[in-house]
């Protein structure tokens, strides 16, 4: 028997009040990795208290950095780095561990990183990372489950992605800033998290043009220096709370957001019947709970984010009609469908497309989290389901949502963290 945390949700409550949005997980992790590029002390503010942040901290410590987390602030001293390996026991729980590969080979000429793990759905290939580093002159081998990269000195090159990749764009940005000559990345990811990384690297002394566009040009420099940064808000957490407010017929205000990061989600919410107002740093959503069906197709930024696909599916599960949800970013990201069906959702899956027929009610049941965003969708479903919903394996959601049960409870949700025995 293993004792693990779970969430218990009693559905039916409208959400009302104000919620503070935390710093972005997907922005802070590559920023943390980039502290390996120059020795010295770094201060990072608005850092969410998440499992993935703790894992990245342990990874940096295993390389030799000193890391201290206090009151949503990180202090990192990278002067003691002497080991250039990211071991399996850390990397297996978090795909973002791959971010240390670029900085390690760029600064030290050597990096050994275990093939990444993380969410239990579908392959997210690392070939773009490997091919890009090879173009910069790194010798790459994959041995015994590890990616090993060597290079006396990286050299600038032109890298063109067939498909924009957030992870590969970030990794190659960090590798290229210390390379000789100029590197051009075409079809680069434009997500706000990559723009935030670009700005931080510029603060460190990197020469990068094209931030926020699909064309990045990096002129390598001999050395960088430490810098400080405040992490951008988490747009996916914000989107999750917006959906929660809408589907419960609530009235909630989100503080500490970047409104322009949420344009595609806000547009779809308006069409589905939500009333939205606010400014650049706050958003208020009001709803009568009468949800119109709205089709969505996920796309790279600024399109509808794949990380909001599961949450939108729950919203459409209680809409007044049918909607089609298509995921063009990750074609097999639908492990939550079977668990939502246990709650009574009417969903038919056909490859990367889900047809969702809205129902008047969902019904509470015992369900299991399979990945980070699936976990959020199950909690949202529990908020509107009749009766009690138990969500197991919440360590997934602790990777990416800070105190989600406390934030929801403060808005009026009947939710709490409990423990259960699981048979192994």
Image (cartoon, rainbow, N blue to C red):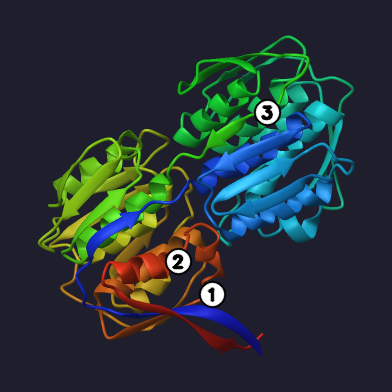
Q: Earlier in the sequence, mark 3 or mark 2?
A: 3
Q: Which residue is mark 2?
A: 375
- In the picture, the disc for residue 19 is none
Q: Residue at x 41, y 73 (%)?
A: 339
Tell me: 109 left or right of 307: right
Q: Position of residue 306 (x, y in %)?
A: 42, 47
Quick one: which residue is furthest to the front in this view?
Answer: 71
The span from disc 3 to disc 2 (Cα, nearest Å) is: 31 Å
Q: Nearer the viewer, residue 280 or 208?
A: 280
SS at badge 3? helix
Q: Residue at x 87, y 26 (%)?
A: 151
Q: Position of residue 73 (x, y in %)?
A: 58, 48
Q: How many marks?
A: 3
Q: Is residue 94 visible?
A: no
Q: Residue at x 55, y 34 (%)?
A: 229
In the picture, residue 323 is in which quadrant?
bottom left
Q: Which residue is mark 1?
A: 393
Between marks 3 and 2 in the image, the one whose residue lies nearer the viewer: 3
Quadrant of the rendering where the N terminus is positioned: bottom right
Q: Is residue 173 visible?
A: yes
Q: Residue at x 49, y 54 (%)?
A: 332
The span from disc 2 to disc 1 (Cα, nearest Å) is: 8 Å
Quick check: marks 2 and 1 in contact, CB under 8 Å? yes
Q: Is residue 330 above or below residue 263?
A: below
Q: Earlier in the sequence, mark 1 or mark 3?
A: 3
Q: Which residue is mark 3?
A: 174
Q: Earlier in the sequence, mark 2 or mark 1?
A: 2
SS at badge 1? loop
Q: Position of residue 346 (x, y in %)?
A: 27, 70
């Amino acid at each position: 028997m293993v004792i693990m945390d779970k969430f218990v949700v009693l559905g039916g409550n409208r959400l009302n009040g104000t919620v503070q949005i935390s710093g972005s997980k997907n922005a802070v992790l590559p920023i943390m990795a980039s502290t390996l590029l120059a020795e010295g002390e770094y201060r990072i503010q608005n850092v969410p208290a998440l499992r993935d942040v703790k894992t990245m901290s342990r990874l940096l410590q295993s390389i030799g950095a000193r890391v201290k987390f206090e009151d949503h602030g990180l202090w990192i001293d990278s002067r003691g780095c002497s080991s250039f390996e990211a071991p399996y026991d850390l990397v297996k729980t978090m795909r973002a561990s791959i971010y240390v590969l670029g900085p390690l080979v760029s600064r030290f000429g050597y990096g050994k990183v275990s093939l990444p793990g993380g969410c239990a759905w579908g392959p997210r290939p690392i070939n773009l990372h490997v091919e890009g580093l090879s173009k910069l002159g790194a010798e790459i081998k994959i041995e015994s489950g590890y990616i090993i990269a060597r290079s006396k000195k990286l050299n600038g090159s032109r890298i063109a992605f067939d498909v924009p990749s957030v992870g590969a764009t970030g990794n190659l940005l960090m590798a290229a800033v210390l390379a000789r000559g100029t590197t051009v990345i075409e079809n680069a990811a434009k997500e706000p998290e990559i723009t935030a990384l670009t700005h931080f690297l510029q603060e460190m002394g990197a020469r990068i043009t094209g931030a926020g566009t699909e064309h990045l040009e990096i002129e390598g420099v001999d050395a960088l220096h430490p810098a400080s940064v405040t992490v951008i808000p988490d747009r996916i957490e914000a989107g999750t709370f917006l959906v929660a407010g809408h589907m419960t017929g609530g009235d909630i205000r989100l503080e500490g957001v970047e409104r322009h990061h949420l344009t595609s989600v806000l547009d779809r919410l308006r069409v589905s019947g939500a009333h939205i107002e606010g400014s650049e740093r706050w958003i208020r959503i009001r709803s009568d709970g009468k949800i119109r069906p709205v089709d969505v197709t996920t796309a790279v930024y600024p399109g509808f984010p794949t990380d909001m696909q599961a949450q939108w599916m729950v919203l459409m599960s209680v809409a007044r009609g049918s909607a089609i949800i298509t995921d063009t970013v990750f074609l097999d990201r639908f492990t939550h469908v079977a668990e939502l069906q246990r709650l009574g959702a009417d969903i038919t899956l056909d490859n990367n497309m889900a047809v969702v027929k809205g129902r008047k009610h969902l019904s509470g049941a015992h369900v299991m989290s399979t990945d980070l965003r699936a976990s959020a969708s199950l909690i949202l479903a529990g908020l509107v389901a009749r009766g009690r919903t138990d969500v197991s394996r919440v360590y997934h959601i602790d990777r990416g949502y800070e105190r989600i049960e406390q934030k929801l409870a403060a808005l009026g949700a009947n939710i709490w963290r409990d423990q259960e025995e699981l048979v192994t």
